[in-house]
Image (cartoon, grey):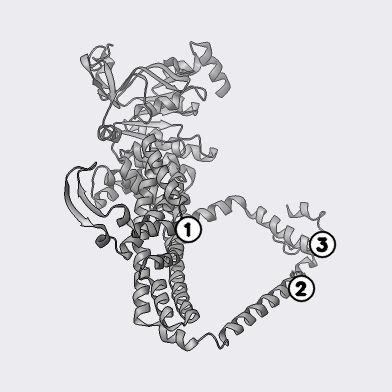
């Protein structure tokens, strides 16, 4: 291969992988081409960022002392805890709903598919803000809720809707049901990414559909599900701030309450932002480790695919030949 | 040879493992199986050959009810596969409950063209999956059995590798071990070497040859005429959804009775 390449390269052409004592080509050093435009862009970006930070940090109207004072304020921490709870519970419920809807959507029954389709259509198609306000005001539609025989049959237990649907409960309902619609699509894509042969292999050793789903399909679907799930989770951490419109008592709500009292709007928004950043950063780190957990065979697979692309030593030697040849031609 | 009396009648029928009678199957507008009759005795190795699209893989998939049939009966060990007689005078066939279908599949091992190992489980966990999840064996017991089986297919040292770390031939041998772990009475092979690089075919055929020698009843859909000739007790040639002819390999390969068989063999031999 190397000898074939020689006539085509220029004199400065080739770093020799195969033939060590060819000629003085070995003494050549490979350098990068200078890129002045790149360094200019870096400089501009750095200057702009520094200036922006400077104007914020030394700004006399931004009261950093107030920020520091409120960062660990009890009220703020309570709101933070509510935000965490809302996120965890509605994501868990969202996943449960999502798996159910996805399985319905992939079922053989047209009725189940239609029901699932209608669910996603409706809850993805209307604004979450509208849904939250709707759940909070459920009492206007159903003053009393209870358990009993459907279609106006006798009731066994009944509650005043306004007592059951607190801000927190309305927030959970709205967030979970809305998240379920998005998760359904994510889970469906995940399930469909698994080779149908996996189902047959499971069936051929006598596994039930449920076992095939939980032991064979879903674990493999995870690889496709986890990255968008991480996105949804991080998005949810911040979306919970919407519940401030229904007295959700979350981080955003309590921040608002505080600045409406002391007029330190920017400082308290800073406090809230800092905590949201802490939460999303933690979530990103967790996502990284979860992704790694669900790709046990991935690293060797990647190596194998690359191994196929670069079959043997000859292939690699060619690559080594080509790259410096391009540099040398410049 | 009536529909009901499979166990009596002619002498070789006494230890019949699989019998198919008038099996028909259509996909939309095309009838892919046009009334297949077939019997396989215990310990017999039947190789099914035929051009692609002849229906041989579909037939195999009917034997463990991965495909529905439209007419006919398939029995394994005398038990109707996938269906039960139903209705007045039992003249209709109704699909079995999922639980019963699963119980039947436990006894019928299947090896697929593209292996279909579970990629998120190591080789030994692939083999353990059936015994643990279906038969309710303890993990320890299942693992001991799985390692024995992997040893039998020559992969004891690969037990803890993931499928992506194994060659195609090794994956297929794990797949055979996975099917054997259910202790089947019948093994179905659906073109087990068609997805393999040529140099890996031999190791899989070797395992299948050993399995045949151990007395396993096997139905093998294959394009490996050499294997069919050497290992099969009987070869079945299918074309356009119908059995053209069946016979001992030495007869069928050297002196086929039908022109279609002759024409097919001339293209593959």
Q: Chain of mark 3?
A: A
Is A142 on the left-hand or right-hand side of A41?
A: left
Callout 1: few (<14), some (14-19), or many (20+) C-alpha neighbours within 10 Å? some
Q: Earlier in the sequence, mark 2 or mark 3?
A: 2
Is A303 on the left-hand or right-hand side of A83?
A: right
Q: Which residue is mark 3?
A: A329
Q: Chain of mark 2?
A: A
Callout 3: few (<14), some (14-19), or many (20+) C-alpha neighbours within 10 Å? few
The span from disc 2 to disc 3 (Cα, nearest Å) is: 20 Å
From this view, report whether residue B109 is shown above or below residue B225: below
The span from disc 1 to disc 2 (Cα, nearest Å) is: 37 Å
Query: Is disc 1 placed on a helix, strand or loop?
Result: helix
Q: Which residue is mark 2?
A: A36
Residue at point 40%, 46% (across, down): A119
Q: Earlier in the sequence, mark 1 or mark 2?
A: 2
Q: Which residue is mark 1?
A: A227
Residue A159 in picture, x, y percent from top left:
21, 57
Q: Chain of mark 1?
A: A
């Amino acid at each position: 291969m190397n000898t074939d390449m020689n006539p085509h390269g220029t004199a400065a052409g080739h770093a020799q992988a195969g033939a060590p004592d060819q000629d003085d080509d070995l003494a050549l050093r490979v350098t990068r081409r200078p890129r002045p435009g790149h360094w200019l862009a870096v400089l501009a970006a750095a200057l702009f960022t520094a200036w922006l930070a400077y104007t914020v940090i030394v700004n006399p109207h931004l009261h950093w002392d107030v920020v520091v004072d409120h960062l660990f304020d009890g009220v703020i921490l309570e709101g933070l805890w509510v935000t965490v709870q809302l996120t965890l519970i509605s994501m868990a419920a969202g996943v449960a709903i999502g798996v159910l809807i996805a399985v319905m959507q992939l079922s053989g029954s047209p009725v189940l598919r239609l029901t699932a389709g209608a669910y996603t259509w409706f809850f993805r198609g209307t604004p979450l803000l509208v849904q939250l306000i709707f759940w909070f005001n459920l009492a206007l539609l159903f003053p009393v809720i209870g358990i009993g025989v459907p279609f106006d049959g006798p009731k066994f237990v009944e509650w005043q809707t306004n007592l059951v649907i607190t801000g927190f409960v309305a927030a959970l309902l709205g967030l979970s049901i809305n998240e379920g619609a998005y998760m359904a699509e994510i889970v469906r894509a995940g399930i469909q990414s698994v080779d149908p042969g996996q189902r047959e292999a499971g069936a051929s050793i006598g596994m039930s559909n449920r076992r095939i789903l939980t032991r064979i399909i879903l674990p493999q679907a995870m690889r496709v599900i986890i990255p968008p799930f991480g996105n949804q989770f991080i998005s949810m951490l911040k979306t919970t701030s919407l519940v401030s419109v229904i007295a959700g008592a979350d981080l955003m709500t309590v921040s608002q309450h505080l600045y409406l009292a002391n007029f330190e709007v920017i400082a308290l928004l800073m406090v809230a932002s800092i905590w949201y950043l802490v939460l999303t950063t933690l979530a990103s780190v967790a996502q990284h480790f979860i992704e790694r957990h669900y790709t046990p065979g991935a690293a060797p697979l990647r190596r194998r695919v690359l191994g196929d692309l670069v079959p043997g030593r000859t292939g690699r030697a060619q690559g080594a030949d080509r790259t410096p040849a391009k540099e040398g031609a410049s | 040879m009536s529909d009901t009396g499979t166990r009596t009648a002619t002498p070789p029928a006494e230890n019949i493992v699989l019998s198919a009678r008038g099996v028909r199957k259509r996909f939309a507008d095309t009838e892919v199986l046009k009334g297949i009759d077939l019997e396989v005795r215990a310990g017999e190795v039947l190789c099914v050959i035929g051009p692609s699209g002849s229906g041989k893989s579909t037939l195999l998939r009917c034997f463990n009810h991965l495909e529905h049939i439209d007419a006919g009966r398939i029995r394994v060990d005398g038990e109707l596969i996938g269906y039960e007689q139903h209705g007045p005078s039992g003249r209709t066939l109704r699909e079995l409950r999922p639980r019963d279908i699963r119980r039947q599949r436990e006894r019928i091992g299947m090896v697929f063209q593209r292996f279909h190992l579970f990629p998120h489980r190591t080789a030994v966990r692939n083999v353990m999956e059936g015994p643990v999840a279906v038969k309710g064996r303890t993990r320890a017991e299942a693992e001991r059995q799985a390692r024995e089986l992997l040893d039998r297919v020559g992969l004891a040292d690969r037990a803890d590798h993931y499928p992506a770390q194994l060659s195609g031939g090794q994956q297929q041998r794990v797949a055979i071990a996975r099917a054997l772990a259910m202790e089947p009475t019948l093994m179905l092979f659906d073109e087990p070497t068609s997805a393999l690089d040529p140099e890996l075919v031999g190791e899989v055929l070797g395992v299948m040859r050993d399995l045949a020698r151990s007395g396993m009843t096997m139905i093998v859909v294959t394009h490996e005429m050499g294997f069919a000739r050497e290992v099969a007790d009987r070869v079945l040639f299918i074309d356009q959804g119908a059995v053209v002819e069946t016979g001992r390999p030495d007869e069928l390969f050297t002196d086929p009775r039908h022109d279609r068989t002759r024409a097919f063999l001339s293209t593959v031999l």
